[in-house]
Structures are given as structure tokens and as C-alpha cells.
Image (tube, rainbow, N blue to C red):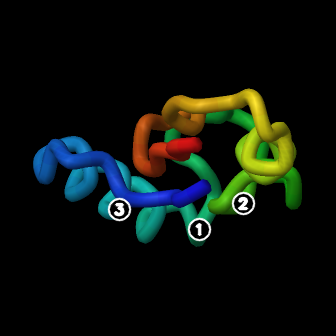
């Protein structure tokens, strides 16, 4: 298993700018709650699933098996 940044540098730049503006909260989510702080709870749970392969909600990270 490996987690890496999206290979699309434009996506990474846009998401990282959004994270800075939102104090580390996912720019793709409306609620500013601890579960939406990057790396969000949803993706941390997906990482723990051995069968999951794919992007996090905002497409910043990608998990491979």
C-alpha cells in the first residue's frame, strides 16, 4: 500500500491553495469540523481498507494497493 499525491500538478496546487485558505480543512467540504481536516477522516478510513484503491474526496491523495 502507498499513498501519494495526485499526479496532476494543477489539481495539487489548487487543493493546496484551498487548504491554506481554509486553515487545513478540505476545500471540497462545507463544514469545518475535525473530520474534514486534511488528511480527512473519510480517507484515513479508506486507507485502512485493504481493498480500497483510489483518490480521496478532493483528489489530492491517491492510495494504491
Label at residue 6: none
Q: What's the residue at 41%, 48% (across, down)? A: 60
- Cβ–Cβ below 8 Å for labels 3 and 1? no
Which of the two residues, 39 or 62, is positioned nearer the viewer here? 62
Q: Is residue 52 left or right of residue 3?
A: right
Report helix, strand or loop for mark 1: loop
The percent position of residue 1, horizontal first and vertical second, equals 61, 55
SS assignment at label 2: loop
Disc 2 and disc 1 in contact, CB within 8 angstroms: yes
Q: Position of residue 17 (x, y in %)?
A: 31, 61
Say which residue label 1 marks. 24
Mark 3 residue crowding within 10 angstroms, few (<14) / some (14–19) / many (20+) = some
x 57%, y 38%: residue: 56
- Residue annotated with mark 3: 16
The spot of residue 4 in percent (x, y) is 42, 59
Q: Is residue 3 above or below residue 60?
A: below
Give the Cα separation between the discs numbered 3 and 1. Answer: 9 Å
In the displayed structure, would residue 16 be above or below residue 56?
below
The x and y percentages for residue 29 are 64, 34
Q: What whole-number distance in Å separates the C-alpha atoms at marks 2 and 1?
A: 6 Å
- Residue to which mark 2 is pinned: 37
Tag 2: Cα neighbours inside 10 Å, few (<14), some, or many (≥20)? some
Q: Is residue 10 above or below residue 39?
A: above
Q: For the point 58% across and 70% down, which residue is it?
A: 23
Seen at 87% across and 60% down, the residue is: 34
Q: Secondary structure at mark 3?
A: helix
Amino acid at each position: 500500500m502507498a499513498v501519494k499525491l495526485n499526479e496532476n500538478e494543477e489539481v495539487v496546487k489548487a487543493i493546496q491553495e484551498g487548504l491554506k485558505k481554509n486553515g487545513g480543512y478540505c476545500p471540497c467540504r462545507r463544514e469545518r469540523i475535525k473530520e474534514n481536516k486534511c488528511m480527512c477522516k473519510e480517507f484515513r478510513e479508506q486507507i485502512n481498507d485493504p481493498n480500497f484503491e483510489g483518490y480521496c474526496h478532493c483528489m489530492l491523495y491517491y492510495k494504491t494497493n
